[in-house]
């Protein structure tokens, strides 16, 4: 009897320790992830004088929103944000349309050298982006697309991983649905837009969020193709804050915090579809 009591107590201790550890690790990861944003917010509400005079003072005394007003009023922050939104939205829409069509073709259609062409597309994943920057720049210059929105949009449209994602997801769509749609009078495009795309919402959400986030934070290509101040995107524009306000950390943090807000809003709105797309196909009935 005493041995049973001892073993039950040890199991409770063991279970309680495992329970605590199981919850402590995610909490620790969440704190580490959120801490930089909290730090950015606290610094952005402070005057540079207090930061340089006492670096350990994190609580703003008194808090001020002058740094945010300075970022918005004394720079082209609104213009840069508009450029980034326009480019990110345009690239995302075009990528979803083009890559879903390509995924549908590679998943549901038979044509000569299909697998070879798909393998060549996947091989583009292994090519570093820096290798293609110079040829792409020369092409845009010869076409007269430097410092234009088409020049900012065309190059990022080629995402091999997007074709792979859509192809793998559309493999799971039964062919019988497409045959039934064509029997009911749908054309090839009608079956694609009315049957395939609605069933591919999870994959489209994953690809859309991934593309938007990549374009929102893209720095190298806009830096190369857009040299005018009015054509800069937000990441390129933010780099100027480091040179103009080298010692004003409050303004730098305020600009960085404002640049993060749109992408956080997009992710929070589409988080449910993003998780559903990542887990699609993981469970089978």
Image (tube, rainbow, N blue to C red):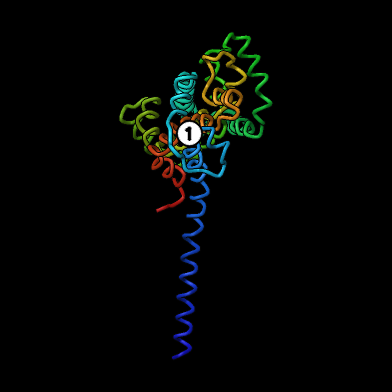
Q: Secondary structure at mark 1?
A: helix
In the image, farthest residue toward the left: 184
Residue 259 x %, y % = 48, 30
Location of residue 83 with respect to 203 vertically, above or below = above
Q: Is residue 35 visible?
A: yes
- Residue beneath label 1, please? 257
> Is there any visible trace of residue 209 in the rendered image?
no
The one nearer the camera, 265 or 154, is: 265
What residue is at 57 percent from the left and 11 percent from the top?
A: 145
Is 270 placed left or right of 99 in the picture? left
Answer with the quarter of the image where residue 152 lies. top right
- The image quadrant of residue 176 is top left
- Locate residue 221, reporting x and y percent: 60, 23
> Which class describes the residues within 10 Å of circle 1: few (<14), some (14-19), or many (20+)?
some
Vertical placement of residue 175 versus 129, above or below: below
Closer-to-camera residue (283/243) = 243
Left or right: where does residue 273 sit relative to residue 43? left
x, y percent for residue 228: 56, 13
Residue at image coords 66%, 31%: 127
Task: Give percent across and percent down for residue 229.
Answer: 55, 15
- The foreground one among 190 and 155 is 155
């Amino acid at each position: 009897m005493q041995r049973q009591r001892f073993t039950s107590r040890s199991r409770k201790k063991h279970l309680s320790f495992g329970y605590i550890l199981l919850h402590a690790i995610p909490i620790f990861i969440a704190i580490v992830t959120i801490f930089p944003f909290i730090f950015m917010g606290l610094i952005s509400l402070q005057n540079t004088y207090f930061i340089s005079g006492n670096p350990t003072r994190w609580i703003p005394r008194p808090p001020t929103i002058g740094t945010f007003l300075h970022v918005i009023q004394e720079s082209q922050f609104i213009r840069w944000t508009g450029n980034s939104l326009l480019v990110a939205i345009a690239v995302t829409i075009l990528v979803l349309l083009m890559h879903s069509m390509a995924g549908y073709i590679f998943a549901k259609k038979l044509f000569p050298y299909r697998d070879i062409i798909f393998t060549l597309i996947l091989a583009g994943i292994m090519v570093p982006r820096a290798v293609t920057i110079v040829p792409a720049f020369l092409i845009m210059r010869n076409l007269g697309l430097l410092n234009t929105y088409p020049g900012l949009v065309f190059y990022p449209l080629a995402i091999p991983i997007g074709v792979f994602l859509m192809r793998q997801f559309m493999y799971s769509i039964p062919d019988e649905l497409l045959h039934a749609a064509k029997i009911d009078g749908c054309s090839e495009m009608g079956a694609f837009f009315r049957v395939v795309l609605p069933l591919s919402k999870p994959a489209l959400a994953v690809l859309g969020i991934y593309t938007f986030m990549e374009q929102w934070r893209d720095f190298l290509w806009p830096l190369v193709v857009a040299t005018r101040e009015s054509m800069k995107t937000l990441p390129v524009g933010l780099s100027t804050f480091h040179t103009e306000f080298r010692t004003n950390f409050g303004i730098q943090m305020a600009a960085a915090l404002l640049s993060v807000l749109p992408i956080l809003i997009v992710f929070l709105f589409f988080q449910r579809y993003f998780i559903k797309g990542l887990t699609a196909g993981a469970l089978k009935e």
